[in-house]
Image (cartoon, helix red, strand yellow):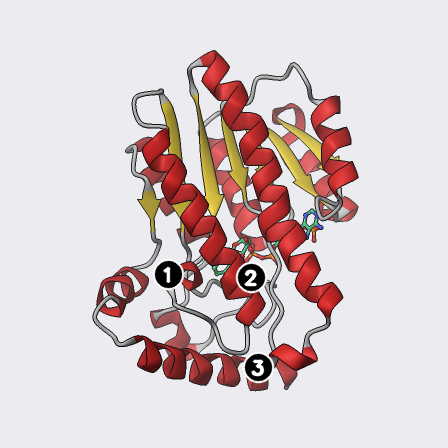
Amino acid sequence: MNILITGATGGIGQALVEVFYKNSWNILAVGRNKKILEELKLKYGDKIEIYSRDIGKEKEIIEFLEEIRGREIDLLINGAGIGEIGEFENISLIEEQRMIDINIQALLMLTKYFYKKMLERKEGGIINISSTAGFQVGGPLMCGYYATKAYVNSLTFGLIEESKGKNIKIMLLCPGPTATNFKGMKSEIEGAKKFYITTPKEVANQCYRDYILGKNLSIPGRVNRILYYLNKFIPWKIQLKNIEKIQRKKQIETLN
Ligand SMILES: NC(=O)c1ccc[n+]([C@@H]2O[C@H](COP(=O)([O-])OP(=O)(O)OC[C@H]3O[C@@H](n4cnc5c(N)ncnc54)[C@H](OP(=O)(O)O)[C@@H]3O)[C@@H](O)[C@H]2O)c1
């Protein structure tokens, strides 16, 4: 079975590579960081093919798809994603557009390409990595990022329904705060944060389990699942205030 993972060089992506490798999948790993890709190659040998590509550039995606044309991909994981934290006026238009290019445009291009191929083959699966942020009405201090994840949620939920009866498994993976090098996060978890911050390994294991079980929505971490349900009962203005407080704290912590 072949799996294509974008964001394979990042915290969650690398953990996913490990889980799928252990379950005997052949991996096509995409990221930009050549050093990490080489390390993955050393570790997983023949079971992995590495592709250093900037999927924020449409041209590189088109060339990549041309290069792997004819390869059967049984599962696509759209994992690459970036975030920017700060007041809207302090995040440049270029940074906002880059988030859209990677979190939305690349995910859309790859999903459309492989979904159509999977329809022809009458089998396959796609996991889109969004975030619990995608369920919020908005994300003060991370306005653009939250908006990109709302897009991923909406697109994926739509596709979940459309794909019914077509033997294509679509799953939306929504991690909460996870210990990686993602903007605003740290790869080390200290003290009480262990209670609500998940590790990339926990996220990847839950993702694998839920996908194999045929679930359409995977939210790793008990606290995140509880918050997901509670959130439905919180008035939107209060949600925004809470998120603003959380992001402000994160912003201060990452500046220090
Ligand atoms: N960490 C969290 O708290 C958290 C919470 C919820 C959702 N998520 C989501 O989980 C996903 C993975 O994030 P992570 O936490 O693992 O972050 P990460 O450690 O920063 O990894 C991000 C990944 O995206 C790749 N990427 C970024 N820009 C790229 C580009 N232009 N071309 C190709 N690849 C690119 C990176 O590869 P290179 O640097 O090698 O290009 C890296 O593999 C993202 O979609 C993120 O939104 C994260």
Q: Nearer the viewer, residue 135 or 177?
A: 135
* Gap in angstroms between the C-alphas marked 1 and 2: 21 Å
| Secondary structure type for disc 3 | helix
The spot of residue 62 in percent (x, y) is: 73, 32
Mark 2: C-beta under 8 Å from nearest atom of ligand 1: yes
Q: Nearer the viewer, residue 196 or 142?
A: 142
Mark 1 or 2: in front is: 1
Quadrant location of the C terminus in the rendered image = bottom right
| Amino acid at the residue labelled 2 | Thr
Structural crowding at the residue carrying mark 2, measured as other residues with C-alpha within 10 Å and reported as few (<14), some (14–19) or many (≥20): some
| Amino acid at the residue labelled 1 | Phe
* Gap in angstroms between the C-alphas marked 2 and 3: 16 Å
The spot of residue 51 in percent (x, y) is: 73, 35
What residue does disc 3 label? 251
Q: Nearer the viewer, residue 173 or 25?
A: 173
State which tag comes first along the sequence, 2 or 3: 2
| Amino acid at the residue labelled 3 | Gln
Quadrant in which residue 213 is drawn: top left
Is residue 188 shown above or below 123?
below
State which tag comes first along the sequence, 1 or 3: 1
Residue 180 disc label: 2
Mark 3: C-beta under 8 Å from nearest atom of ligand 1: no
The spot of residue 252 in percent (x, y) is: 57, 86
* Gap in angstroms between the C-alphas marked 1 and 3: 21 Å
